[in-house]
Each structure stands twice: as structure tokens, then as C-alpha cells.
Image (spheres, rainbow, N blue to C red):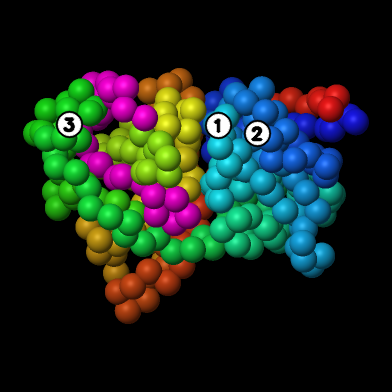
């Protein structure tokens, strides 16, 4: 059977940047092992398989695989799939107005808004189906520094300390003192994120690009991804870090996270949060996406 696929670059408005994504359409009849093998063949951070929704009112059901295992939720596959489905199913309508796309993932239904402004790249944002929550205690600064090729003095800035949050999967958030220290990171052979454990997300408030709020790097070698150029699910959980250490006031706030610059894959993730009575009420993740290629798999 011929199954159509597309590849996109996500969290970028230019091709050959951002985080690559494969989206396989016509996925009915593929079992888990076959989908995992196809994801390994693409060997991208994630591959999405589009299926008919369980609830007919929704747009599609998504299965998301890294090269080595399935994920219950991921940000750049959600943004990329929402952009692609809107583009393929209603291109003329998308050119006139924003479209609501609801995709079913293992974490739950995810509500996305796709848009295509004239003269701009297509884009989408989604509301977090699950707010971030603490998932454990972080190791000591000394242990973290040793695992990253840094000194303990490179860990932390201001009030920010290492912590763990998840919004679908656990992440170990490590504040790094400067861009200089960030460039020195050399992770050891530890399999970050192995066996359901946390991937490691490094961040600093020193940035490279005008308009960015945070600079980040993500290591996820336990899932077959040595370094990820853009990680929407971690950015979603990062809302918990912002709430803990920045304590933003009531109202809506927007942050831009730059990632992937050290890899030559500059990516820009928009994180919106809505705070009410000092608590996180809701959060969104968004960004642009570019269709790069299309083809068919004969399986």
C-alpha cells in the first residue's frame, strides 16, 4: 500500500532550520511495531502517524514516535501536524481565517489553532492539555555539572535552581549561568531520558537573537535524540519553571525560547501563559512550520 508522507521544519519560518518532522498520512493498518520501524527509518526526532479520530467531531488521531519509542505527547509534532492538516484539507479557508484543529493524542485531546497570514509562513499554536507539575527532585549541582562537562559554578543564575517538571513527560530543567557556559556543554554518555526518566533541558536568560527571552538546549539521548533542535513539550513544562522562579503577575505573558542555535538549526518557540490569582491558569505553545518535502512509502 502506498502511504503518503510529508516532512516539515517546525518552529522556523525558513526551510532547513527548526526541528524536522515526518508526518505519515493513510496510517490505518499499521501496527505499533511497523510504525516504530518507519520512525527509525526516517530517523528524525519524531515521526507522526495520522489516523482517523476516535471521536468523529475531532480532526485526527496522532501517534508520535521517536526513533526508539512512542511518546504520549510532543510539541513540535503537534504544531507541525496541525499546520499540515489545515494546509491539506482547507488551504483556501486557511488563507482567509484561522482554523481550529483538534487532534487526539495519548495525553488527551489537544486544541490547536492554525493560521496562514499573507506573506508569512504557516503557523499553529495549541493549548496545553495538561498543566506542568513537579515530577521529582533534581540531583545536586555537582552531579549535574559532572554530567554536562561543566563546573558547579556554571549551574544556576538569579533565583533559578535545577528542578523537575512535566506536562506529559518529565524534564530535568537546569539553569545555566551564561551563553559562554552553555557553549561549553559536553554531555557524558549518560542516556538522558532513558526508561521513562527525565530528558535534560538547559536554559539561560542570556540570548542570541533580538526578541528572544530564553536560550535553551535539550539532550534526550535515551530516546535516540542526542540533541533536539526544538522541544515543544519541554517548553510547555518550562511554564512551571517560570511560575516558580519568575513569579509573573496576573494576566497574559508571552515568552520566546530560542533553541537549536548550537546545532545550526535555529528554532523559535512561543510560550504563552495566563496567570490568575498568582496561579497558572493556562498555557500555549506555538510557532511556524514549513513544508519541505513529500513522497510515498510502499508498505
Tell me the residue at 62%/26% (across/down).
Answer: 40
Q: Residue at x 44, y 64 (%)?
A: 131
Badges 2 and 1: C-beta atoms under 8 Å apart? yes
In this rendering, position of residue 17 left or right of residue 55: left
In this view, the mark in front (1 or 3): 1
Which residue is drawn at the image coordinates 32% and 22% (left, top)?
189
First in sequence: mark 2 vs mark 3:
2
Which is nearer the N-term, disc 2 or disc 1? Answer: 2
Which quarter of the image is occupied by the C terminus?
top right
Task: Determine contact: label 1, label 3, CB under 8 Å.
Answer: no
Q: Rounded to the nearest whole Å, what is the CA distance between mark 2 and mark 3?
A: 34 Å
Q: Position of residue 173 (x, y in %)?
A: 29, 45
Q: Nearer the viewer, residue 70 or 273?
A: 70
At label 1, counting other C-alpha atoms closer than 10 Å, the crowd grade (few under 14, some 14-19, many 20 or more) is some
Front-most of residues 112 and 69? 69
Residue 189 position (above or below residue 63): above
| Residue 68: assigned label | 1
Which percent across, then down, holds residue 161?
18, 48
The reply, left or right, for residue 91 in relation to residue 277 is right
Left or right of residue 54, residue 130 in this image: left
Label 2 element class: helix
- Magenta residues span 166-191
Which SS class for mark 3?
Answer: helix
Please state the horizontal and vertical placement of residue 247, each as a whole percent of the image: 25, 64
Query: Which quadrant holds residue 5?
Result: top right
Work out whether residue 97 can be spotted.
no
Badge 3 is on which residue?
145
Single out the residue that lies furthest toward the right. 1
Which of the two labelled residues, at mark 1 and mark 3, occupies the earlier sequence position?
1
Q: Is residue 25 visible?
A: yes
Residue extending furthest toward the bottom: 277
Amino acid at each position: 500500500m502506498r502511504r503518503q508522507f510529508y516532512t516539515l521544519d517546525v518552529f522556523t519560518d525558513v526551510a532547513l532550520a527548526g526541528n524536522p518532522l515526518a508526518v505519515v498520512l493513510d496510517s490505518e493498518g499499521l501496527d505499533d511495531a511497523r510504525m516504530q520501524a518507519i520512525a527509525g527509518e526516517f530517523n528524525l526526532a519524531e515521526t507522526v502517524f495520522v489516523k482517523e479520530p476516535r471521536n468523529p467531531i475531532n480532526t485526527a488521531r496522532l501517534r508520535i514516535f521517536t526513533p526508539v519509542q512512542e511518546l504520549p505527547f510532543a510539541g513540535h509534532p503537534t504544531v507541525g501536524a496541525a499546520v499540515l492538516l489545515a494546509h491539506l484539507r482547507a488551504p483556501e479557508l486557511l488563507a482567509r481565517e484561522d482554523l481550529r484543529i483538534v487532534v487526539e493524542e495519548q495525553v488527551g485531546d489537544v486544541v490547536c489553532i492554525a493560521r496562514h497570514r499573507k506573506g508569512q509562513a504557516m503557523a499553529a499554536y495549541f493549548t496545553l492539555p495538561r498543566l506542568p507539575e513537579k515530577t521529582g527532585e533534581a540531583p545536586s549541582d555537582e552531579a549535574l555539572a559532572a554530567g554536562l562537562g561543566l563546573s558547579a559554578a556554571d549551574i544556576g543564575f538569579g533565583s533559578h535552581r535545577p528542578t523537575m517538571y512535566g506536562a506529559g513527560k518529565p524534564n530535568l530543567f537546569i539553569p545555566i549561568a551564561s551563553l559562554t557556559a552553555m557553549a561549553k556543554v559536553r554531555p557524558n554518555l549518560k542516556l538522558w531520558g532513558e526508561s521513562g526518566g527525565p530528558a535534560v533541558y538547559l536554559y539561560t536568560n542570556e540570548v542570541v537573537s533580538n526578541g528572544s527571552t530564553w536560550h535553551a538546549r535539550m539532550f534526550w539521548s535515551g530516546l535516540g535524540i542526542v540533541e533536539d533542535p526544538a522541544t515543544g513539550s519541554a517548553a510547555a513544562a518550562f511554564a512551571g519553571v517560570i511560575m516558580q522562579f519568575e513569579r509573573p503577575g496576573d494576566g497574559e505573558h508571552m515568552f520566546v525560547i530560542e533553541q537549536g542555535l548550537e546545532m545550526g538549526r535555529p528554532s523559535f518557540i512561543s510560550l504563552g501563559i495566563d496567570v490568575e490569582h498568582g496561579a497558572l491558569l493556562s498555557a500555549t505553545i506555538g510557532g511556524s512550520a514549513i513544508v519541505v518535502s513529500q513522497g510515498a512509502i510502499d508498505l
